[in-house]
Every structure is written in C-alpha cells, then in structure tokens.
Image: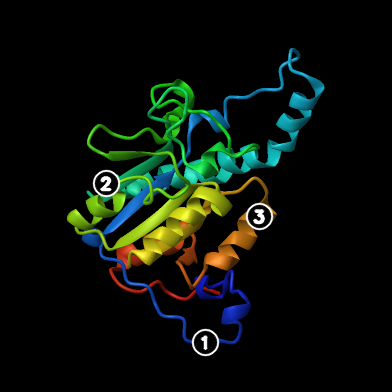
C-alpha cells in the first residue's frame, strides 16, 4: 500500500491530494526517542512475585516487536544517516536529581509513567544496539516531549534542520508528544511505522492514525530512504 493511503483518519477519508514529501539530506535529521535499558532489563525470574511474572508476560508482544522490528529499523536508519553525514539526535528520559523531584507532573503520576531514572544510572542509558556516537547530540528530558523540557528546538534550528524523522517509544506517549511539539514549531515530521512501538499494536496503530497528515506523515523506513536516495519524491507503490 502506498504511504499516502496508510493510517488515514476520518478527517482525511476521501481526500485525494495528500502532498508529496521532499527531504533534503542537509536539512533532515533522525531523532531516536527513549529506547533505554529500563524497558528491556526486567525478566520473569523465579524470585519474582506471581504478579510481576504475569506483568512480564503481558509485555512479551512489545519486547518481540522491539527486538524484531523497531530496533533493527532504528539501527538501519542510524547507519544510513551516519553514512551520509546526516544529523542524528537522541532523547532520553532521565532525572537530573537522584530523587527525581525535577520531573514534570506527567512523569510523577502513579502508574506506568512513574519511573525513576537518574541520569547516570545504567537503566536510563540508550540501549547498546543504538548507542550514540561521541559527536551525536543526546538531550535529557523530564517531560514526555523532547522539545518541551530541553533546548532541542533551538539546537535543531541553529543547525539548519527543517525535517525530522522520528523513531522510538512509546508511539502514544513520548513519540506523540514530541511529534506534536515539533509540528507546532514548524518542523516537517515523518514518523516511521516500523521504527516505533507502543505497549500494544492497537495503541500504536490508533496513535499513528491520529497523528498522520495533521502533525506528521506516517511512513516506513523504505519510503524515507527512497525519498532521500532519489532526492525528491517517494514513488507510489501498489
């Protein structure tokens, strides 16, 4: 299916004229969001409680998608951007204070989002498979949006970035918040379907449908590489 026909929401049903995408290598950056050790370090050890083991199993589809789809896609995109001397940025959730009192309210609410990640702890680091190179920019945030809690917008503008290709987790949380912030700051945003994940495929798909065509264009990694390789327009595919 052509990328223009995937994830069309109610608002865009019947609309034929979805614009082509143009990406200049010198103005396009890759942003990797929150692919950190904390989300992959837990195991269903026998010492864990029954509830902990059940929760670990509940997350099995997420871990499988990350291992088989998202991390390989993000790694491939990193290789492509690096080999063409294109800019790469990383964002990660991490607290500046060890007790986490510098976190935003959304990061302190009880439940899933309430994870304490001091900036120097192993759990808060980017996974080794996507490890940043020494000259690549990593921003540390205590918010969902990578723009709201950092100077990323300013840095990208200073470096002449106009287009941002986004991969990472979670599609319906930090990815979504960042994409909306980027769009509000007038960046052209592309979210890679095969480069992102939510806790479930349903949440992932629903959020992409919400974001698509309004805040970003949802594409796959092959679509973006085709645009960059051909220097202009992504070809239609059946």
Rendered location of residue 185, percent (x, y): 33, 64
Q: Quadrant of the N terminus?
A: bottom right
Q: Within 10 Å of the Cα at label 2, are there few (<14), some (14-19), or many (20+) other Cα atoms?
A: few
Secondary structure at badge 1 equals: loop
**How far apart are the alpha carbons under marks 2 and 3?**
33 Å
The residue shown at (71%, 30%) is 56
The mark that comes first in sequence, 2 or 3, is 2
**How far apart are the alpha carbons under marks 3 and 1?**
26 Å
Which of the pair 232/137 is nearer the observer? Answer: 137
Secondary structure at badge 3 equals: helix
Rendered location of residue 19, percent (x, y): 41, 80
Q: Mark 3 touching mark 1, by CB under 8 A?
A: no
Say which mark, if any, is on residue 206. Answer: none
Decide if residue 145 is in sight here. Answer: yes
Rendered location of residue 121, percent (x, y): 44, 21
Q: Is 230 on the left or on the right of 115, as rendered?
A: left
User: Which residue is labeled 2 in the image?
Assistant: 83
The mark that comes first in sequence, 3 or 1, is 1
Which one is closest to the eye, mark 3 or mark 1? 3
The residue shown at (81%, 22%) is 50
**How far apart are the alpha carbons under marks 2 and 1?**
36 Å
Which one is closest to the eye, mark 2 or mark 1? 1
User: Which residue is labeled 1 in the image?
Assistant: 16
Q: Mark 2 touching mark 1, by CB under 8 A?
A: no
User: Which residue is labeled 3 in the image?
Assistant: 203
Res. 79 image quadrant: top left
Q: Is 22 on the left or on the right of 7, as rendered?
A: left
Which of the pair 85/160 is nearer the observer? Answer: 160
The residue shown at (22%, 36%) is 135
Which of the pair 151/1 is nearer the observer? Answer: 151
């Amino acid at each position: 299916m052509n990328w223009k026909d995937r994830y069309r929401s109610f608002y865009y049903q019947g609309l034929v004229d979805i614009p082509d995408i143009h990406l200049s290598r010198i103005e396009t950056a890759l942003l990797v969001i929150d692919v950190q050790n904390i989300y992959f370090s837990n195991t269903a050890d026998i010492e864990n409680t029954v509830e902990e083991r059940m929760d670990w199993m509940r997350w099995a589809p997420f871990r499988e998608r990350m291992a088989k789809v998202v991390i390989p896609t993000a790694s491939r995109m990193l290789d492509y951007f690096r080999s063409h001397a294109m800019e790469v940025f990383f964002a990660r959730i991490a607290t500046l204070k060890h007790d986490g009192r510098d976190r935003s309210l959304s990061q302190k609410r009880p439940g899933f989002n309430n994870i304490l990640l001091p900036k120097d702890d192993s759990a808060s680091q980017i996974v080794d498979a996507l490890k940043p190179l020494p000259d690549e920019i990593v921003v540390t945030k205590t918010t969902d949006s990578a723009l709201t809690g950092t100077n990323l917008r300013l840095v990208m503008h200073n470096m002449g970035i106009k287009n941002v290709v986004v991969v990472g987790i979670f599609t319906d949380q930090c990815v979504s918040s960042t994409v909306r912030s980027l769009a509000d700051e007038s960046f052209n945003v592309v979210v890679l379907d095969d480069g992102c994940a939510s806790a479930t495929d349903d949440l992932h798909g629903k959020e992409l449908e919400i974001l698509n065509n309004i805040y970003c264009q949802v594409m796959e990694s092959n679509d973006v590489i085709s645009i960059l390789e051909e220097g202009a327009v992504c070809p239609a595919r059946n």
